[in-house]
Amino acid sequence: MNKKINLDHNLYILNKKEGIYMITEDLNLFLSNLNVFYRKLQNYHWNIIGEDFFNVHSKLEELYDEINKQIDEIAEHILSIGQMPLGTMKDYLNTAQISEASNEKKCSKHIYETILKDYNILIENVTKIKEDADNQNKYSTSALMDEYLVNYEKIVWMITQLLMNKDNNN
């Protein structure tokens, strides 16, 4: 009987560790997406053109400043659960689902359409992490994802509203 209990206990520990590794992989994917997205937002900030330059330039800076804070939070959270965050651009580029922006001038409509897609990728990342964290009783990870989910969904709504206006004006 003791062997069975020990076996079950070891299986529980193994499953618990596998769960942490799975969440860590998802967190590192999210971290990679955040890092590439940060560079993309900054690239667009530098390369925006058009009559709405000042407004979009300022908004992009606000967005990339927020993403930069999230990068640090996620990396530190990965460390706090005893795992290792990715830390090189090579790692991020090899892992990320979000693509880099090219070095060329862009109008605001193109920028907003592109970052809308990227925010939806971030929502998918965060939702998966939250679901897995909830299933494994990793409540600190789940709570952190709640904050991002609320923020990203609001940004998606706002960009969608803005693009509807741009479509009606063109």
Image (spheres, rainbow, N blue to C red):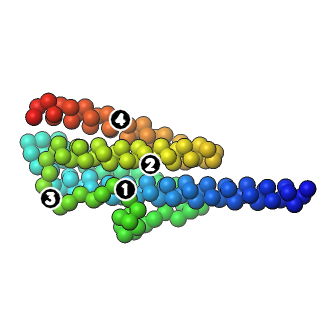
**What residue do we see at 39% from left, 47% from top?**
122
- Single out the mark in the foreground, 3 or 4: 3
Alpha-carbon span between mark 2 and mark 3: 28 Å
Judging by the rendered image, the residue that carries numbered circle 3 is 104
N-terminal-most mark, 2 or 1: 1
Q: Quadrant of the C terminus?
A: top left
Alpha-carbon span between mark 1 and mark 4: 21 Å
Q: Quadrant of residue 87?
A: bottom left
Pick the front one: 51 or 114: 114
Answer whether residue 80 is visible to the viewer in this image: no
Judging by the rendered image, the residue that carries numbered circle 2 is 125
Circles 2, 3 touching at the beta carbon (< 8 Å) = no
User: Could you say where residue 10 lies in the image, as x and y percent from the top left?
Assistant: 76, 60
User: Could you say where residue 91 lies in the image, as x and y percent from the top left?
Assistant: 40, 67
Alpha-carbon span between mark 3 and mark 4: 28 Å
N-terminal-most mark, 1 or 4: 1
Which label number is shown at residue 97? Answer: 1
Instruction: Say what secondary structure mark 1 lies in.
Output: loop
- The amino acid pointed to by label 3 is Glu
- The amino acid pointed to by label 4 is Lys
Q: Quadrant of the N terminus?
A: bottom right
Judging by the rendered image, the residue that carries numbered circle 4 is 154
Alpha-carbon span between mark 2 and mark 1: 10 Å
Instruction: Say what secondary structure mark 2 lies in.
Output: helix
Circles 2, 1 touching at the beta carbon (< 8 Å) = yes
- The amino acid pointed to by label 2 is Asn
N-terminal-most mark, 3 or 4: 3
